[in-house]
Amino acid sequence: MSTADRIVITGVGLTSPIGDSLETLRANLLGGVAGISTIETRFMGEVFAGVCRYDERKYQKAKERRRGTRVGSIAIYCAGEAVARAGLDSGGLDLSRVGVYLGVTEHGTVETENEIDVIRQFDYDTKYWSHHHNPRTVANNPAGEVTLNMGITGPHYTLGAACAAGNAGLIQGVQMLRLGEVDVALSGGVSESIHSFGIFASFASQNALAVGGDPAQASRPFDKTRNGIVVSEGGCVFVLERLPDALRRDAGILAEVVGYGMNSDASDPVMPNTERQVQCIALALERAGIEPGDIDLVSTHATSTEVGDAREAAAIRQVFGDYHNVYVNNTKSFIGHAMGAAGALELAGNLGSFADQVVHPTINVRELDPECAIRNLVLNEPHRVEKVDFVLNNSFGMLGINSVVVVKRYVA
C-alpha cells in the first residue's frame, strides 16, 4: 500500500451516556461507570435508556437548534469537537475538499412522531404540521446539518446501515480519501433513537427490550440473566486524513485504519448469521494484511440478546479461539445500544488501549452464559496486557448487514 493510501484518525468528537469527550469516555470505561437511566416515553411509560447531556449550544445558536433535529445537533457537536481536536479549526481548510459521511440506523421517525402528536391535539388538522418537517426528515439530514453549520461544500450523505452504521460511515470516509474525492473526511455514526417511542415498542414486541431491575445493570451482554437491549442515543465523528497530509501539518495521530469488511447475511431479517460474521472478519483481516493472531483486542457488537450474543461469540471462537493473546470486550454494557452510533463509539472507547495497554471490561456479567464463553473475555475489571497494536471492531445490524474495522497503533 502506498503512503498516500494510508488513512489515519487525527481527531475524535463524541457524545455518549458516559461522557462527551474521548478522555471522559475512557475514564468511565476503565472506572466501571454505567450510563443507563430511566426516561418516560409516549404510550409506554418508563423505559431504560442511555441519555446524552452534551452542550447543545456550543456549536449552534438557539434558532438553528430549534429548526433542526436532535440527531443533527448531535452530529454538529461531534463534528465540531472532532475538527477542534484535530487542529483543523484554525483556518486554511479548503471546505470544498471536506466530506461528511455519517451512519444512521433510521431517520425521520422521531420528527414524524412528534408532528403527529402535535396535530392529534388539533383534531389532526394538518395546518399545524411544521414546515420544517421535510428538511428534518430527509435521509441526509444529520450530515447535511453539519455542512450547513460548518460551511462545508464538499460531498455529504448518511449511510443507512442499521446498527452496523457507525463502522460503515468510517469505511466510507476511508474509501473516499483513497479515491481522492476529498482531503478530509468527517466520518462515523449518530443516533437519536431514544426519542422515538416506536423503537422501544418494536423491541418490546419482539421480547428484546431490557426491563426490570437496576438501570445501571440493565445492559448485560453475555450474562446468563440478560433480557434485552437498552436503547441509547449518541454520536461519534472521526477526522480521517491521508497519512502524508496529517504528517505535513504535524497532526496528532490517534490510530491508522488498516482494514475493513462489509457483507450481508442474506438469511434472515433479524437473526444474525455466524458464518457471514466470520467471513466479514476474515475480509477485514485480509485487507489489513494480518493474521487473526495479530489482533490484540476484539470489540464485540453483542447487544444483550440471547441469540445475537451467542452467535457472535461462536464467530469469535471460530476466528480467534486458537490464540491466547487475543482479548475481547464489550462497550454496550456501559452505554447501551447507541444504534447508528454504536460501532463508532465502541471503537473510540478502545483507542485508549494503544496508549495505556489496558483492555476495558465488559461489566454486569455475574454469571457468564456458557454459550457466550470466549477465551480472554475481559469481565468486570480492566485488564492490563503486554501490548495493543491492533484493535478489531465488530458492528452488525438488522437485515443481515455486517461491518468490521481494524485499526492499528500508529508508529512513526
Image: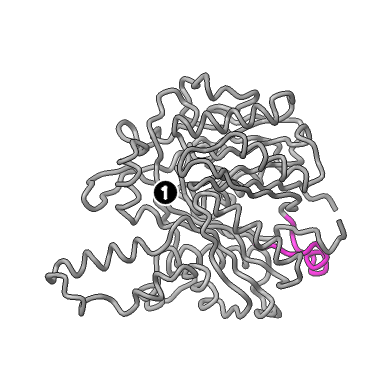
Q: What residue is shown at x 76% (from left), y 50% (from top)?
A: 258
Determine the residue located farthest toward the right in the rendered image.
Answer: 2
**Quarter the N terminus occupies:** bottom right
Residue 72 or residue 155, whichever sits in front: 155
Determine the residue located farthest toward the front in the rendered image.
Answer: 267
Q: Is residue 279 above or below residue 73?
A: above
Location of residue 389 (image quadrant): top right
Q: List x then y, in percent, for residue 41.
A: 26, 51
Q: What residue is shown at x 59% (from left), y 47% (from top)?
A: 264
Q: Is residue 53 above or below residue 292?
A: below
Q: List x then y, in percent, for residue 300.
A: 58, 38
Give the residues drawn in magenta, as a range.
239-253
Tell me the residue that label 1 is attached to. Answer: 232
Specify whether residue 40 is painted magenta. no
Q: List x then y, in percent, for residue 298.
A: 65, 37
In this image, 190 relative to 279: left or right?
left
| SS assignment at label 1 | strand
Location of residue 247 (image quadrant): bottom right
Q: Is residue 312 above or below residue 284?
A: above
